[in-house]
Image: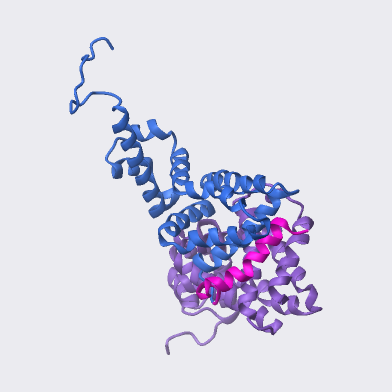
Chain colours: A blue, B purple
Amino acid sequence: MTDVPAGNGPGVRRRGRPPRTESADTRDRILVTAREEFSEHGYEKTSVRAIAKAAGVDSALVHHYFGTKEQIFEAAISVAFAPALNAPVAIADGPLDGVGERLTRFIFGIWENPTTRTPLLAIVRSAVTNDTAAAVFRRLIASQLLRRLAEQLDLPDAELRAELAAAQLVGCAMLRYVIKVEPLASADLEQIVARVAPVVQGHLTGP
Amino acid sequence: MTDVPAGNGPGVRRRGRPPRTESADTRDRILVTAREEFSEHGYEKTSVRAIAKAAGVDSALVHHYFGTKEQIFEAAISVAFAPALNAPVAIADGPLDGVGERLTRFIFGIWENPTTRTPLLAIVRSAVTNDTAAAVFRRLIASQLLRRLAEQLDLPDAELRAELAAAQLVGCAMLRYVIKVEPLASADLEQIVARVAPVVQGHLTGP
């Protein structure tokens, strides 16, 4: 280490670990690329090598920053769902009798927006077909989103309640956006919210 | 054709199309094999050649009986779900205020039974990841099962009602049997039925 040059002016490239800002940029680029690759090809068909190649870095650097493929997947999902993972506080905030509608609108909002629908669809597909991806999905969405919502609500059986409410929304998303069953696939969103929000509310706060 | 021997005693193998009973046996064997192959490998990774090989017949015979891969898939699902496709009549039969519980118990019954869970899981996985498989799933399950249930119920908006009820059940199945989210995955079935059946009932017959 003593033979490393003492002075490193701006623009002078060093060997070894890149400086902090360049490092952060590279890390972000890998993460964005990983999300795109997982979205396009699913968990099973995406390799660390393919992510590295698409990001223009060495596979070793991807492993250095994120660890295993499972950990990269988890990191990529976490970024994609950062707003969702912070949502429980906002959803639980406000009158308790409006929480069903707030949660329903939040979930349909994600699915109705093409920008968030595409990565979500990829994650759902990966989670349904691959056990490792299912475990990641379970940890992130179930544990963080649902458990945090349950904590905010502070009701008996809150976790099971949150999951049964989520089940209604997950099933609607499956039939409307994935399997595309009619008339649900083309039904007016407000009509669906009007029928689903009370059910979600009932699961969360009902007797 | 005139040079075909006139007499074919039992045990004498003919060329060309097999006689009626042998034909029916072969057709059934192909169908059972197809279901196994689709269950094990999913829609995309299953080829007509692989089905033919596993059934010990020529690919041409598979095409002769069933047509395209999509049509084989549909035929295989139809057999697997023959009881389910006849269920709407039984579910709709009886007092209307018990239809939610009958439908709920019927769907959970399929998922709780390992024999029917395995092919169903394969079909769900195929339908979520492949558009052709999704179309088959949509035609069979949605059109036949849900539409027939809706017809039996004879209510306004019956199809949308049946689909929203199905959404609650599909979502429960996804979280409990596919993603395996706790506490839902290990919850007592009667506890789930007690919470879900009224919701299904509400979708079907509520205001």
Q: Residue at x 74, y 75 (%)?
A: B91
Figure disc tally? 0
| Residue sticking out furthest to the right | B95
Instruction: Decide which of A105, B24 is in the foreground and name it.
Output: A105
Q: Is residue A123 visible?
A: yes
Residue A49 in sight from this viewpoint: no
| Residue that appears at 28% across and 12% down | A1
Say whether residue A34 is left or right of residue A58.
right
The image position of residue A159, as x and y in percent, is 68, 48
Is residue A120 depicted above or below B164 in this figure?
above
Most frequent secondary structure within the magenta stretch:
helix
Residue A187 percent across, percent down from the top left: 53, 75
- Specify the quadrant of the image occupied by residue A9: top left
**Where on the picture, by quarter, is residue B111?**
bottom right
Q: Name the quarter where the C terminus of chain B is drawn.
A: bottom right
Where on the picture, by quarter, is residue B75? Answer: bottom right
Q: Is residue B188 above or below residue A8?
A: below
> Where does the image place residue A180, in percent across and percent down from the top left?
51, 70
Front-lying residue, A60 or B121: A60
Which residue is painted at 66% across and 53% down in the image? A162
Q: Where is residue A184 shown, x and y percent of the image?
A: 55, 73
In the displayed orientation, state which residue is furthest to the front.
A95
- Name the foreground residue: B126 vs B52: B126
Q: Is A83 inside the magenta-drawn segment? A: no
The magenta stretch spans which residues? A183-207
Query: Does the magenta segment cover residue A205?
Result: yes
The residue sitting at 58% across, 61% down in the picture is: A104
Image quadrant containing the N terminus of chain B: bottom left
Q: Is residue B158 left or right of residue A8?
A: right
- Taking the view exactly as shown, the residue that stands out farthest to the top is A2
